Image: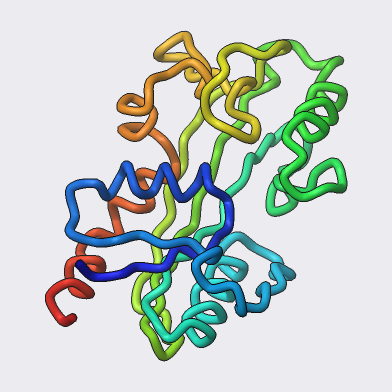
């Protein structure tokens, strides 16, 4: 089975990508399988810049095809925040509780109709020489509610309401989430390139 390295150590992201690509004969590994790797600095000014940096940088280090993505939450009424700083919104990478608390505080004076938001995911696929072979973007629109609903997902998911389903990403089943999420939309666009990897390996 062909190996595809996912440019993250986030087990939740790895699990989602494995589930989305479950029908493909590809073994998804995360960076924890390569203990000698150095972290690629995410200092780009956009989701695309960060995704490209990670895909190319990690591919050069591990010598394998790498799929890397940069994703986050965009709230227009907050001038695009948290944006590319979503994972570190409250200062600590991956501090979901603190990030959510800061978001709710920032939105507390806004009525529901002003709390629209969208998740964005930009994913890039690099070959073993670090060349970017494919790029894709997916978005999912919703609304930030005032209290947590659901225990599923991660990040801002328990606050991100999908209006059509009357449920948050924290409440939706994995099957439904994977059919509408920003990450699944971006990864779907990369499937032809994944097949190219499989056919040429």
Residue 44 image point, x, y percent: 69, 70
Q: In the displayed structure, would residue 159 be above or below residue 26?
A: above
Q: What is the x, y in percent for residue 164?
A: 41, 14
Front in this rendered view, residue 173 or 183: 173
Q: Which of 39/183 is in front?
A: 39
Instruction: Specify the quadrant that holds the N terminus.
Output: bottom left
Residue 93 spot, x, y in % from top left: 76, 50
Can you give x and y, in whole percent of width and height, for residue 110 in the image?
79, 16
The answer to whether 192 is drawn above or below residue 115 in the figure is: below
Q: Would you place residue 121 above or below residue 26 in this image?
A: above
Instruction: Tell me which residue sits at (35%, 45%) in the image.
Output: 185
**Is 3 left or right of 164, judged from the image as shown?**
left
Residue 64 position (above or below residue 118): below
Q: Is residue 56 left or right of residue 187?
A: right
> What is the quadrant of residue 81 in the picture?
top right
Q: Quadrant of the C terminus?
A: bottom left
Residue at x-position 48% and y-position 12%: 167
């Amino acid at each position: 089975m062909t190996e595809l390295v996912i440019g993250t150590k986030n087990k939740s992201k790895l699990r989602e990508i494995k589930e989305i690509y479950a029908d493909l004969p590809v073994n998804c590994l995360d960076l924890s399988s390569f203990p000698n790797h150095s972290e690629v600095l995410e200092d780009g000014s956009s989701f695309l810049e960060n995704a490209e940096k990670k895909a190319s940088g990690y591919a050069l280090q591990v010598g394998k095809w790498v799929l890397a993505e940069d994703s986050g939450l965009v709230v227009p009424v907050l001038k695009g925040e948290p944006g590319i700083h979503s994972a570190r919104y409250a200062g600590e990478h991956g501090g979901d509780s603190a990030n959510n608390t800061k978001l709710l505080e920032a939105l507390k004076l806004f009525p529901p109709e002003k709390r629209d938001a969208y998740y964005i995911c930009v994913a890039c696929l690099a070959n073993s020489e670090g060349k970017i072979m494919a790029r894709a973007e997916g978005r999912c629109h919703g609304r930030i509610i005032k209290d947590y609903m659901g225990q599923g997902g991660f990040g801002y998911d328990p606050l991100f309401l999908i209006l059509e389903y009357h449920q948050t990403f924290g409440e939706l089943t994995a099957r439904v989430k994977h059919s509408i999420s920003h990450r699944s939309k971006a990864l779907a666009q990369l499937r032809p390139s994944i097949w190219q990897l499989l056919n040429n390996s």
